[in-house]
Image (cartoon, helix red, strand yellow):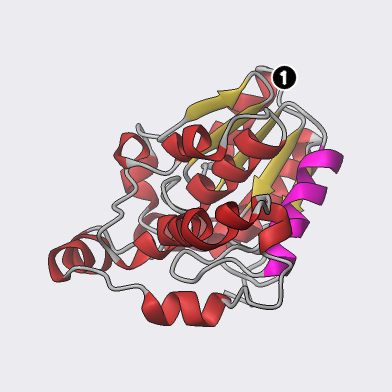
Amino acid sequence: MAAIDLSTPLGRFKAYLDLIWKDHAWLRLGFQNAHWVSPDLIRTNQPWPFQIAWWKRRGVKSVINLRGGGYPTSFYLLEKDACERLDLDLVNFAVASREAPTKEQVLGARTLFDTVQYPAIMHCKSGADRAGIMSVLYAHYKLGLPLREALKELGFRTLHVKHGQVGVLGYTFERYFAEGEPKGFSFFDWVQQPEYDPKQIRADFKASGLGSLVTERLLRRE
């Protein structure tokens, strides 16, 4: 994808072809998995450029890309191009779907939500896992919801399958309720404690075989 030049019809065609097949964008033509977290934030799956334009017409000012940026994948090249043409802020904030979040990611999310221009759309690939944990943090931090209530953003309603490998995201909060909350720590304080160990949490988490089959084989989650 590094050789693709979106300024040429052939290059743009190659980018869209890659987006459709390698990034499974054909599944997202009529289904955005879009949900309003608040009047200022919409969570969704990876948008097509025409869907970004649709959100722009509805007042969106920023696009938060949770898949990371700076590399020549088709989704990123086309998304960056669309945001530039539409005069939208594109914010790249990489989050993992099969790892417990690091201290830097949790605190960085708080900074992100304080500085991004709203209204905004926030997306990963499927809109279920990375968008889910970030929506939990947003609802807890910006909306002031109790963490247990905010966790509704990480559920089957938005296609998150907690029994698969991506279930480590919800398991992180379970560990907080068991270890951090009894000591009086907020979630944001807990991740800054020396005993918070994302690698150990990942090692302790056990996904079910059926759940992993669904997320890794059938849904092919990123």
Which residue corresponds to the image point at 55% horizontal and 40% vertical from the top-left?
147
Q: Residue at x 59, y 48 (%)?
A: 134
Q: Position of residue 161 (x, y in %)?
A: 29, 52
Asked whether 65 or 4 is in front, the reply is 65
Residue receiving disc 1: 59
- Dividing the picture into quadrants, the one containing residue 82 is top right
Residue 69 in view in this figure: no
Residue 61's x, y, as percent?
A: 77, 30
Q: Is residue 58 above or below residue 130?
A: above
Q: Which is the main secondary structure of the residues drawn in magenta?
A: helix
Question: Can see residue 91?
Answer: yes
Does 115 appear in magenta?
A: yes
Give the residue at x 59% y 78%: 197
Q: Compared to 170, does 100 lie above or below?
A: below
Disc tally is 1
Crowding around mark 1 (Cα neighbors within 10 Å: few <14, some 14 to 19, many 20+) is few
Q: Amino acid at mark 1?
A: Gly
Q: Is residue 11 magenta?
A: no
Residue at the spot 48% in from the left edge and 38% down from the top edge: 148
Q: Which residues are magenta?
A: 103-116
